[in-house]
Every structure is written in structure tokens, then in C-alpha cells.
Amino acid sequence: MSAADDAPPQPAATTADFRCDLAGPTEPFPHFWEHTVGSDHAPMALRADWQAQMRRAHDELGFGHVRFHGLLSDDVGTLIAEGETLFYSFFNADQIFDFLLSIGMKPFVELSFMPTALASGDKTVFHYRANVSPPKDYANWALLIRKLVAHWVERYGLAEVRQWFFEVWNEPNLDAFGSGTQDNYFKLYKSTADAIKSVDAELKVGGPATAANAWVSDFIAFCASNDAAADFISTHHYPTDAFGLPGDDTVTQLSKSRRSVLRDETREVRRQAGDRPVYYTEWCTSSNPRDPLHDEPYAAVFIVKTIMEARSLVEGYSYWTFSDIFEENYLPSMPFHGGFGLLNIHGVAKPAYRAFELLHALGGDIASVKGTHPTVDAWVARGAESATVLLTNFALPRHAIAPETVCFTLTTPSTPSGVTIRRIDAEHANAKARWLQLGSPEYPNAAVIADLNAASICHAAAQTFDVRDGAIRFEVTLPPLSVAAITLQLASADHG
């Protein structure tokens, strides 16, 4: 189902008026969303196609860390038992981290799941049967963590490992990943944090790595009263969290969400965290691993709007995930199957990937924009010799939305040498639409992949504009569920 399905009657188009003074004050605009990106579980990072896509996402989108599940699970071989004898093998983990460091990336280390040799039970999750029970012996668990972290310090150097992040477990508030109880998680957390700090006090460890922004205040209180280190706060959220009724489909859940719900939740977590850094280590357009909207322009618009609204609230905002090479349920063969990835299994960029591409190109300062509209939002980012007006036209599924004409006025000391526009919408940078035109081939050949790659590109085109009375004016028509980035090339003197 697409976002247009089951839509209400659409309103008539209106005009959205915005303005900005490029000579006015700005705020710093660090690219916090590039700090980390999510992936599947650890063994996938040993695949050549995963590595090629990871390198591309780093080079083109600027991602600095990657987080994935299952580094301690049996299929990595980190710890196994023969009888009563424990055998440690860090070889596969090293192969993964060696690759990441070789391309300029670092791990955001999620310490999960339980090696069978240490597990107190046989409860598992996902297609790859990750054990989610607590350790039967916390001393042996702590010994594993100390050995592993000390090994990385020896292999990569203390200065390097101090730049990593160690996150304890994944979504412990959900029954799927353990007991779902705070007491059990807090015991595991303290054991793990103490083990990490015993290697070096400056290594960064944090949590609670919860779903739906849960336990943050309780986690901070526990750490304070139990002398447990908490260098950062991590949690997750999706706009489908806690909306709708059990059994509702994803579009129904989204239709019952709120337009800026993730911004509102992030503000609350920021308040609870106080001065501690906050890292969202999972977020996405929905928590459904087979959501068609993940492959469509809807995701691109949601990404841009959500990231721009999260600025100044977090230190990291890790999208889930960079690739459809992902097998929590199984690894599908269909090129567009609603997977979480920015890239599909063949490495074709989805509209979501192009959204991050537009964001990566933005400058490091944000200017003040005046004007409001029910579905259109606008931001202006400045660089040394350019300014980009970023526009979105977004509504949740089954909410009213129409094509809108945006009139934008920019006050600037001089005429730009050029103005270009890049678009993401149903007609632009939409590889899935081209795949559907080609008959939805399940196993595309090289020629089809080349065709899809060409359709995915977010091309720049000339944008017309007028200059009057020291201001630049232009109009842009935004289709429903669209992004437009209008970039002005300016003299460096225009930016002081």
C-alpha cells in the first residue's frame, strides 16, 4: 500500500510564502545524523556486497559509525564451549572492524546477544536465532567483555577505541529481546559497564538502548545510585510506536500518529538526559521490515523533515538501516520489498538515500526562516559559498495534502552566479517507480540494474529566479510527498 491509498478528499492547492535574510544571524548546524547508521547483524558485515554498500554510504553520505546486532552471537564465534571449556575467538569481529577502520569508519558497538555457552536459557529472536536470555554466570559474562575490549585496545590502540561507543544490549524493555524487565537489564548493564571501565576509565559506555524512548529517567537514576557509568543515553523510536490498535496495518498506525511526533519525543528525552549526550541508535519511517513506504518518496520527505526538526536536540541520530542486505526475517530476493535500507539489495539508491545525499551537501550553518504552512516546511542552510533552501511537502497517510506553490524570498547582498534545484518525488529520483514500469522483475539483469540506477539519480536542473530590491525571489511547485533543494552559488564575501 502506498501513502496515496485510502486518502481523504484533497484540498485545493494554496500558496506557501517563506522568507530569509542571508545576512542575518545563523546557528551552527552539525551533521548529527551522519554520526551513526544502522545495519543488520554482524556476520553480514563479512559479505563483499555489504562492504561495497557500506563504503559507498560512508563516501557519499558521510556516515562515521555503524551499529549492528549480534556481535557476540554464536554465528560470529566470539565465544563457544566444548564441554566445560570456553574458547574465545575474536577473529571474525576483527575482520569486521579492520574493514570499517580501513574505509574511515568506526563501530558503534552494540554488545549483544548472549553466546550459547553463557546463556541461562534458550529463548531466541530473528531468523538467525539470536539468544536473548541473561547470562547464567555474570562473572563469565564480565570476563568475556573485558577480554574482548582489552583485545581491541591492544589491536587498535587506546586512542582509537576511546573514539568508539559501547552500547549494552538492544531494546531490553521488549520481551522479544529478553525478559522486558528493568531489574534484569540494569544488572546486565552494570556488569558490562564495570567490565569496560576496568579496561580503561575513558572508554564510552551507555544505554539503555530501549525501544520507544523508555526507561531513560530510571536508567539515569539507577546508574547514579549504583555507581554505574553512563557516558551517554541511547534509545530508539519510530512513528508507529504505540499508535493504533493491535493488528493494525502500518498505514493505519501512521495515520494515527502525529506529524512531528519524533521531534516531540526527542525533546522529552533531551530533557530527561540533562547534560548527557543523546544518541538515537534506531529510527525510521516505520518499524515494519516490509513497509512499501520505505522504498518510496514518502520516506525521503519524512527523513528530511524529521532530521531538520531534531537539530540541536541530539548528538547522533542513527537511521535504521543503510542497506536491504538484512536478514532478521530472511533475506528477500525482490529488489523492492519494503526493507529498511537506503540502498536495495542490488545497491540501487532509494529516494531515502537521495534524501541523505541532499542533507550531506548542506552547509554548516542554519539561518532563520519566516513563514508557516500546514504541509510545507522550509529551512535554509549556508556554506562558505552557497546557500540551500530545503523544502518539503509532507503529510501522514490518510491526511490531506495537495500540490503547493512555494514563493521564497531571500535577502542577499549580491546576485547569485547560479541557482539549481534537485527534487525527490514521484517523478524524480524514484527507482521503484521505474522498476514497476519494467514489470517488477524479481531477478533483474545487469541492464535493468543500470536502468534502475539511472532512474535513482537526483539530477540538478536550473531554477529560474528574479532579483528585485536586494532580494532573490523564486517559485517552486511541490507535489504531495516531495523534497526540493534549491542551491544558490554565492560569493564568499556574502557570508562574512
Image (cartoon, grey):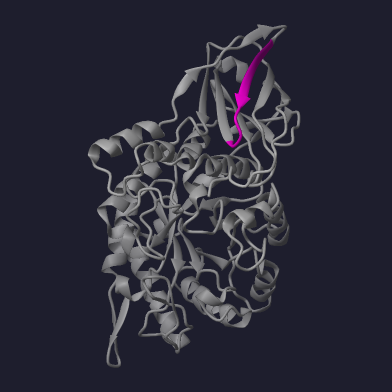
User: Which residue is the extreme one toward the bottom?
Assistant: 84
State the image quarter where residue 229 is shown. Answer: bottom right
Residue 181 in view in this figure: yes
Q: Position of residue 401 (x, y in %)?
A: 67, 37
Name the residue: 24% across, 36% down.
Answer: 447
State the image quarter where residue 384 is shown. Answer: top right
The correct choice, above or below, for 394 with respect to 93 in the image is above
Q: Give the quadrant of the C terminus.
A: top right
The residue lying toward the viewer, choosing from 456 and 399, is 399
The residue lying toward the viewer, choosing from 362 and 142, is 362
The residue lying toward the viewer, choosing from 126 and 49, is 126
Give the magenta range.
471-481
State the image quarter where residue 472 is shown. Answer: top right
The correct choice, above or below, for 474 with respect to 447 in the image is above
Q: Position of residue 370 (x, y in %)?
A: 75, 28
Q: Position of residue 89 (x, y in %)?
A: 28, 74
User: Which residue is the extreme one toward the top?
Assistant: 468
The correct choice, above or below, for 317 with respect to 461 in the image is below
Position of 367 with respect to 69 (left or right) is right
Position of 468 with respect to 40 (left or right) is right
Q: Position of residue 33 (x, y in %)?
A: 54, 46
Q: Main secondary structure of the magenta part?
A: strand
The correct choice, above or below, for 389 with respect to 104 in the image is above
Name the residue: 37% across, 74% down.
Answer: 73
Residue 103 in view in this figure: no
- How many numbered marks, from 0 up? 0
Asked if residue 452 is among those painted magenta in the image, a careful observer would answer no
Name the residue: 31% across, 72% down.
Answer: 75
